[in-house]
Amino acid sequence: MKIALAQMEVVAADPQRNVDNMLSLIEDAKNQNIDLIAFPEMCVGGYLVGDKWENDSFCLDLMSYNDDLIKASKGIAVAYGNVYLDENIKERVGDNNPHPNEDGRIRRYNAAYVFQNGEPVKKVKENKYIPLGIYTKTLLPNYRIFHDKRHFHSTIATAQDFNANLEDLIQPFVIEANGRKVRVGFELCEDLWCEDYRINGKVLNPTKMLINNGSELIVNLSASPWTYGKNNARDRRVKFLKKESLDDFVPFFYVNCTGMQNNGKNLVIFDGGTTIYDKNANPIMLAKETFKQELVTINTENLEEIKPLLRIEKPRIAQRYEAMAEAVLRIKDIIGIKNHPRFVVGMSGGLDSSVITALLANVLGPKNILGVNIPTRYNSSITIQNAEQTVRKTGVNYGIIPIKEIVELNRKLIDDFDPFGADIKLGVYEMENVQLKWPCSMPHYTET
């Protein structure tokens, strides 16, 4: 069986762009005679879109793109992540009982869709509680930047609702390849990070359940943000899965997205890190580059012949710089413009503005950056000299705009405003904060 893992760049809330990208990658896979192509979690509309998940119209719009992907599955199996709004659950399960999301809305899933030849792929053991061709995410993260439990219904909650056995609901799909039926277990992101989840005093392990139900290999569709040391963390988690299943463990395929997404409070960068592990949980194939889109392909018949790889990681500072540089390159996608913006940076001569200026100049070129120093009498000559030194080192455009008169006018307005008759005047330290200066750590941008 030939498998392609599509480490694709995902732009949140831009489904047309994402699906066009997916269709192109599917065509590339077909040209390579791939049997199964797997895409990341929530790759149709993005993963971190905040409260948009509460909007039924937004979810239905994302689901409308399934039609194009189903058509593209002619001659190939396609697995990808998208939301599933379960509007027809009563008809499917055959009762009139309410089956809402925990918030009382229509039940929605963070789901993996699996199609082949224009049809939903059947599971080893079907049930009426989960739709055909759908795997629903079992473990929903609800910490740091993640809010899955707020938006989505889990496989655990479905089992509880219908008094069903959880393991019976977590089933491999049967994919046809070269006249053979291959049982493939699909899961979603957090399902890999199961070590800290418990049920009846034991680890709640979807991977082990899939293996127990006959999976010959596991494919994890992820939208997992970059942090320093993330690849080593992934490797450790797969090793834990191996420890849980012992000799029953099967080859493990991990596909993750690239790009940057915005959850409304954080800009989050995704590194890819797509990896194929053998049945001993050793990495045997890695994506060639971090943060870049790539189609990683392999023939499962040759897995036993491939020797384990030793990861070679860049130093910590190099990794952090690379992540920040990639984030700068993705800002145009976050703000929805075609070309990279130009930036105006308030240069105080301090560390923050100097580092930001150097980063932007290195990534986008110095001619796209304007540094501005806006001194008053509270600025020392040393800070101005520091700013000018940064300009000389980076080559950015630079200007000085004194704002003494504006600051003094503000002083007078504030001092004259004395509604309680206290006759309190602004001191030196207060006046430093009154200065009308741009935050040096927050560059302003203009579209080119």
Image: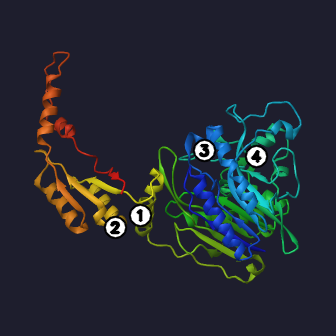
Answer with mark 2 or mark 3, whichever residue precedes in sequence: 3
Q: Name the residue type under label 3.
A: Asn
* Mark 1 in CB contact with mark 2 (< 8 angstroms): yes
Instruction: Give me the disc on residue 362.
Output: 2
What is the spatial separation of the Cα atoms under label 2 and label 3, in whole angstroms?
36 Å
Badge 3 marks a residue whose secondary structure is: loop
Instruction: Give me the disc on residue 155.
Output: 4
User: What residue lies at 56% left-to-right and 46% top-to-bottom?
Assistant: 49
* Mark 4 in CB contact with mark 2 (< 8 angstroms): no
Looking at the rendered image, the disc whose residue lies closer to the viewer, 1 or 4, is 1
What is the spatial separation of the Cα atoms under label 1 and label 2, in whole angstroms?
8 Å
Question: Which quadrant would residue 25 be assigned to in this image?
Answer: bottom right
Residue named by callout 1: 325
Residue named by callout 3: 142
Q: Position of residue 131 (x, y in %)?
A: 81, 48
Q: Name the residue type under label 1.
A: Ala
What is the spatial separation of the Cα atoms under label 1 and label 4, in whole angstroms?
38 Å
Q: Name the residue type under label 2.
A: Asn
Q: In the rendered image, is residue 142 in sight?
A: yes
Q: Position of residue 374 (x, y in %)?
A: 18, 49
Answer with mark 1 or mark 4, whichever residue precedes in sequence: 4
